[in-house]
Image: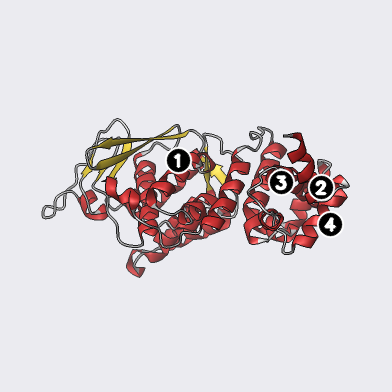
């Protein structure tokens, strides 16, 4: 499911929670504890509006107004906070391949997000522009999470060559080490730029990724492609719930946690309310799950590079035989017969 321009994945709340928890006890207060509790209560929702996201960042800043707070928050991000995109880039062979997959599937993180790359001598410059979440702290945060992802890819404390921020430089300096922004990210930070950018040495693109897994990469890329090609979000209240439900189901397939209880809990919705919203609109969880699995199964079976065991894994089945039985119930033919029919038409 492609995120609409004003929505941000709620997994990006996690670094805020980690940061608040990391504060020294002398810096904590009832307000800090209350905000942490609120963040914990909403992190299970698949996405949140950009305005709400920016408000949460502002509230974190209200309890800890330190310099370059957005960068500090972003640097606490982990690959899992990027969802399927994070797992996909970690499975790539080298950083260049990972960057290509990141840019291809960035719409799964935030609709309206655009990136482009420039090469200048031995330097690679990655630019971003985003239609929403354009406050200074949100822009800092975007830079920080990308640097954190790069560090996870190369497996060490990587620092860019330079970071560019598209807002005026704050009138703050530590008086000894220059701009505190430089100290936080370990490289020069420039301000008032036309766009957000991060510069890295071009040679970094050839660096190997320790967690590379070609087979897993193929499976996750297929899954991400299916999510990217899903129908656009609805605008009515139930439509938003239903789209969020479908997104959560597809994202959860890799873990096999596809019971109604697990999905409702992941969405932060009481199970009774979850069932009621579906039944009031003529749906059941079982029928929604079956419909998604059938649509994805047909797409996956059309890919000759995926085996039937790959397809059953992508759909969240623990055993291939369970997938075969379900597919025959849905279509009256086995997955093998369906694939053979598709190939015969080509």
Label for residue 301? 3
Element under label 3?
helix
State the CA–CA distance, disc 1 to disc 2: 36 Å
Q: Nearer the viewer, mark 1 or mark 3?
A: 3
Q: Which residue position holds label 4?
A: 325
- Earlier in the chain: of badge 4 and badge 2, it is 4
The tag earlier along the polypeptide, 3 or 4, is 3
Which of the labelled discs sits on residue 337, or is there none? Answer: 2
Label 1 vs label 4: CA separation?
A: 37 Å
For the residues bearing labels 4 and 2, Cβ distance under 8 angstroms = no
The residues bearing labels 1 and 3 have C-alpha atoms spaced at a distance of: 26 Å
Mark 4 or 2: in front is 2
Residue 160 in the image, given as x and y percentages of width and height:
27, 49
As drawn, 6 above or below 214: above
Mark 1 lies on residue: 103
Disc with the residue nearer the chain's start (1 vs 3) = 1
| Closer mark to the observer between disc 3 and disc 4 | 3
Sequence-wise, the earlier of marks 1 and 2 is 1
């Amino acid at each position: 499911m492609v995120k609409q321009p004003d929505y941000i994945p709620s997994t990006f709340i996690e670094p805020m929670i980690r940061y608040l928890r990391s504060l020294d006890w002398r810096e904590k207060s009832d307000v800090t504890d209350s905000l942490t509790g609120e963040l914990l209560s909403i992190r299970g929702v698949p996405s949140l509006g950009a305005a709400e996201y920016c408000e949460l960042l502002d509230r974190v800043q209200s309890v800890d107004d330190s310099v370059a707070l957005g960068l500090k928050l972003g640097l606490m991000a982990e690959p899992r906070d990027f969802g399927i995109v994070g797992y996909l880039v970690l499975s790539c062979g080298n950083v260049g391949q990972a960057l290509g997959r990141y840019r291809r599937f960035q719409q799964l993180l935030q609709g309206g997000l655009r990136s482009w790359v420039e090469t200048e001598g031995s330097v690679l410059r990655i630019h971003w522009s985003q239609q929403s979440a354009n406050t200074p702290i949100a822009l800092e945060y975007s830079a920080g999470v990308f640097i954190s992802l790069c560090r996870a890819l190369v497996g060490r404390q990587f620092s860019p060559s330079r970071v560019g921020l598209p807002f005026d430089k704050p009138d703050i300096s530590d008086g000894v080490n220059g701009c505190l922004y430089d100290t936080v990210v370990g490289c020069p930070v420039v301000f008032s730029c036309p766009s957000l950018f991060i510069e890295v040495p071009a040679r970094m693109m050839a660096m190997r990724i320790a967690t590379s897994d070609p087979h897993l990469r193929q499976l996750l890329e297929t899954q991400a492609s299916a999510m990217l090609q899903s129908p656009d979000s609805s605008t009515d209240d139930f439509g938003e719930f239903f789209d969020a439900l479908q997104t959560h189901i597809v994202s959860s397939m890799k873990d096999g946690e596809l019971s109604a209880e697990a999905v409702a809990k992941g969405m932060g919705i009481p199970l009774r309310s979850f069932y009621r919203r579906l039944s009031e609109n003529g749906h059941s969880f079982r029928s929604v799950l079956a419909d998604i699995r059938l649509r994805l199964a047909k797409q996956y079976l059309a890919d000759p590079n995926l085996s039937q065991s790959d397809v059953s894994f992508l759909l969240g089945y623990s055993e291939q035989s369970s997938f075969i039985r379900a597919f025959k119930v849905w279509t009256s033919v086995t997955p093998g017969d369906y694939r053979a029919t598709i190939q015969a038409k080509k």
